[in-house]
Image (tube, rainbow, N blue to C red):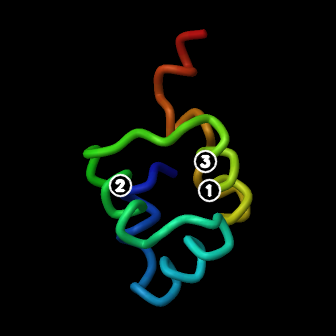
């Protein structure tokens, strides 16, 4: 599941809680979900863990699929 799908499948409070677990801001996550920012590998890994594996690193950083 990519960030936008994750964002849309949960309410704001659930998304904010996931952001807190990933040590990032809700605003930054909104930018990621809408493609205005790209996560670092470390952040993608944190989001993967914080989402209980629902957002995968490859879905968060599609260029990794080509490696």
**Looking at the image, is mark 3 or mark 2 nearer the viewer?**
3
Circle 1 Cα neighbour tier, 10 Å, few/some/many (<14 / 14–19 / ≥20): many
Q: Locate residue 36 relative to residue 10 in the image: left or right.
A: left
Q: Which residue lies at the image location 56% right of the left edge and 20% below the top edge?
A: 65
Residues tagged 3 and 1 counted as in contact (Cβ below 8 A): yes
Corner quadrant of residue 44 = top right
Q: Secondary structure at mark 2?
A: helix
**Looking at the image, is mark 3 or mark 1 nearer the viewer?**
3
> Residue under circle 1?
47
> Residue under circle 3?
43
Q: Which residue lies at the image location 55% right of the left edge and 37% below the top edge?
A: 40
Q: Which residue lies at the image location 33% right of the left edge and 63% below the top edge?
A: 30
> Residue under circle 2?
33
Q: Secondary structure at mark 3?
A: helix
Q: Earlier in the sequence, mark 3 or mark 2?
A: 2
Q: Locate residue 32 relative to residue 45 in the image: left or right.
A: left
Viewer-proximal residue, 51 or 40? 40
């Amino acid at each position: 599941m990519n960030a936008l799908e994750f964002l849309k499948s949960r309410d704001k409070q659930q998304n904010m809680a996931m952001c807190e677990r990933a040590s990032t801001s809700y605003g930054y996550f909104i930018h990621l979900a809408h493609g205005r920012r790209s996560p670092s590998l470390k952040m993608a890994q944190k989001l993967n863990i914080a989402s209980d594996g629902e957002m995968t690193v490859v879905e968060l950083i599609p260029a990794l699929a080509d490696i």
